[in-house]
Amino acid sequence: MNLATPANAMPDSLKGLQILVVDDMQHMRASMRHMLRDLGSDDVDAAADGDEAIRMIAAKPYDVVLCDYNLGDGKDGQQVLEEARHRKALPVASAFVMVTAESHMPMVLGALEYQPDEYLVKPFVKGVLHQRLSRAVQRKRQLRPLGAALADGDNGRALALCDSLSQTDPKQAHELLRIKGELCLAIGDLDRAAAQFEKALAIRDFAWARFGLGRVRLQQGQFLEAQMIFEELLAGNRHYLEVYDWLARAHEAQDQAAAAQKALQAAVALSPKSVRRQRHLGEIALKNADAEAAALAFRSAIEQGRNSCFGSTSEYVQLAEVLIEQGSPAKALAVMRDGRKTFAGKPLEEVQLAAVQATAYHRQGSAAEARRALDEALAIRAGHADELPPAAVTSLARGCLALDKRDAGLDLLRTAVRNGHDDPEVLARAQALFKEFGAEQEGATMIEEARLEMVKLNNLGVELARTNRMAEAVAQFIKAADGLPFNRAVNLNAAKILLTHMRQNGRDGKYMFRLRQYIERARPEGAPSADYENVLKAYREFVAR
Amino acid sequence: MNSSPARQSAHPGEAAGSLRAGVRLDDILPAAIHDAKNSLGVVLSRLDEVSGHCPGGDPRLPALLDARYEIQRINANLVRMLTLHKFHQQGYGLDISLHAVADLLHETVLTHKAVIDGRGIAVEVVCADDLHWYFDYNLLLGVLGNALNNAIRYTHSRVRLSAQAGAEAVAILAEDDGPGFPESMLAHPAVTRAPHAEHGFISGNTGLGLYFSELVAQMHRNRERCGHISLQNAGSLGGGCFGIHLP
């Protein structure tokens, strides 16, 4: 890239830009190369499908990716973009231009990082290609600091940049309004997010602003209003796929699992490609005791996951559990064999899959195989005890309980409960197992103990901090957080204590690594948490000092 | 000619219903159009390669440019059909954003540059660089491409694309110095006319372009106002004047 070009100048020639062309048709790739060469470009690569594109993007920092939306049977252009951004393979200042056959594409309303910088309708002449590429590259360069802040996940800095950038040109100001709304939503500043979206809606009825407002309302607990906003958006355009996900969430929040399932089924009927949507659908169908629909959705998630970076053991495990429940352990074992192949060499995944294999063999009456699978799972776990997430721990516990290793099973559940004391999914899973294996009393005690342990720890921290015994507080919380690596609340509190301590006593190399680690572990998975964002902000300010 | 076919096509629901009478025509139609478009794209880029190698005064050049012009027309029609098909299926979400209007006008000219230069037409763009407006960029490209295409076809020598913002709307005009639109066209708004061969204001034109333009204009809404198109004669260059007005 020609770094000498001023940030706001339109590049005259494409010379020096590293460009990747992605198209499944050979003659289209050739034609694009030809045009780009005529425009002065001397560094053009080409990929014939999505997987090849991802590999190439990961290997070379392209300035521009020119990607056809329709790539045949594998990933489509949107999936290439999502995966490249998700893996952080595409440099922040790179432009992603989506080439389409028609003037209208399924639009991305929410996630900014998944939006192409330009939609270019085929066929186009050289001059148009030049104008669009130059424009996209120029805009990306102007917003490079913002892009960098977003890539660092530093939402606070990104928000500040939005304010300082927005005076320049009107088009940019308009886009910054949207970025600001999304950022406020991401850090859980709901009032400010609502203000941004309402400001946009006062200008025009932008679908993205209505979608933003709907998400704000949902997080503010105004479920019915959120539901109505989402429904209205879909009435205007039933192809807004992300809106179905949020409509489903609005229904779930109102305990309308059947309606939630219907919303997601409508979305997967339009496009089956999203692994996460299929998984979500499977989980909701389970809540509705609709085993058929759940199995179908988990199977689809597995299939789509083969083409995607979003595949996980979760859909394999949940499908196997449905099949075991339906009295088909042989089918469950087939799913697990598939899973073992897919996740071979990944110990954390293998533990969970082997544990489910044990349960399935057990149900089949194959005692020897069951024992062998369980021993294998326990052996792999021994090397990775602290890294195993609570969901995998409960799968392992289930295997132990089923195979009469009651003490080992309950121990594992204690670990899961202590790590996930504030995670309703983990608790629900543990409680189901306590019930299934006649340990409801022990389970209730365990959960209560975990809760009390956390309260006690919290009070101790407050007390030690109040009486200025910071060294003692630090020691207590390091011990607690290291013992409960998956407990977000404990890790967040440990981070707070370390920050307070170092602010008072100066930076300490031996705590800096832990501090980063605790903040990383405390990162919320679903809804944003203002508490977490505050700690993150304090950490960044401390580091910048 | 009775007027009922015109009314039918003007209502999205009815048109979609008649499409669905065919067995999965809804799926076949867009796929077939995409396929045809891909082929046209190849033909177009091949033509450009050939004409790029022709020296300026080459006697074969006009024929190549005529072919190019017709291919672009077919392609534009296919894009419109896809868009209308989506619209009829109730699946069209406008991608309204703020754009520099000059970008839109220049890009429209760039798209037709080969034919414009080949026929020696003088095209001027009159638009303030800082004029920004809210619209769906790719849809407006389709509308203006059609307008410019018509202007190129009927002009003597000059075409002007211009844009001006009023208090509540932007007006984008495509004018030429040709003979202007026939009276019958000026009398009726486009949407109440059928995009139908017999209604074609000029032989070979089905009116699909105008129908599309009117729909796109109407999809652009702001508060209670929605956009519209205008057809006039005796514009600033003396010929036809197509306008699209967006609130």
Image: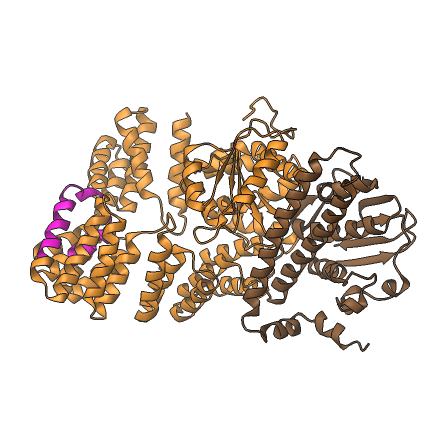
Chain colours: A orange, B brown
Residue B216 is left or right of residue A185, and the answer is right
Tell me where residue A222 appears, x and y as whole percent: 48, 61
Q: Residue furthest front?
A: B59
Residue A466 covered by magenta stretch? no
Tell me where residue A26 appears, x and y as whole percent: 52, 44
Residue A328 is left or right of residue B126, and the answer is left
Work out which quarter of the rendered image holds the C terminus of chain A and state it. top left
Would you identify the image quadrant in which residue A132 lies? Answer: top right
Q: In front: B38, or A139?
A: B38
Residue at 14% over, 58% down: A358
Q: In front: A186, or A221?
A: A186
Q: Is residue A53 above or below residue A316?
A: above
Residue at 32% over, 43% down: A522
Tell me where residue A296 appears, x and y as whole percent: 34, 66
Q: In front: A364, or A180?
A: A364
Would you identify the image quadrant in which residue B81 lies? Answer: bottom right
The part of the chain drawn in magenta is A371-398
Residue A233 is left or right of residue B232, and the answer is left
Classified by dominant secondary structure, the portion drawn in magenta counts as helix
Tell me where residue B22 appears, x and y as whole percent: 58, 74
Q: Residue furthest top?
A: A4
Residue A387 covered by magenta stretch? yes
Residue A371 is left or right of residue A316, and the answer is left
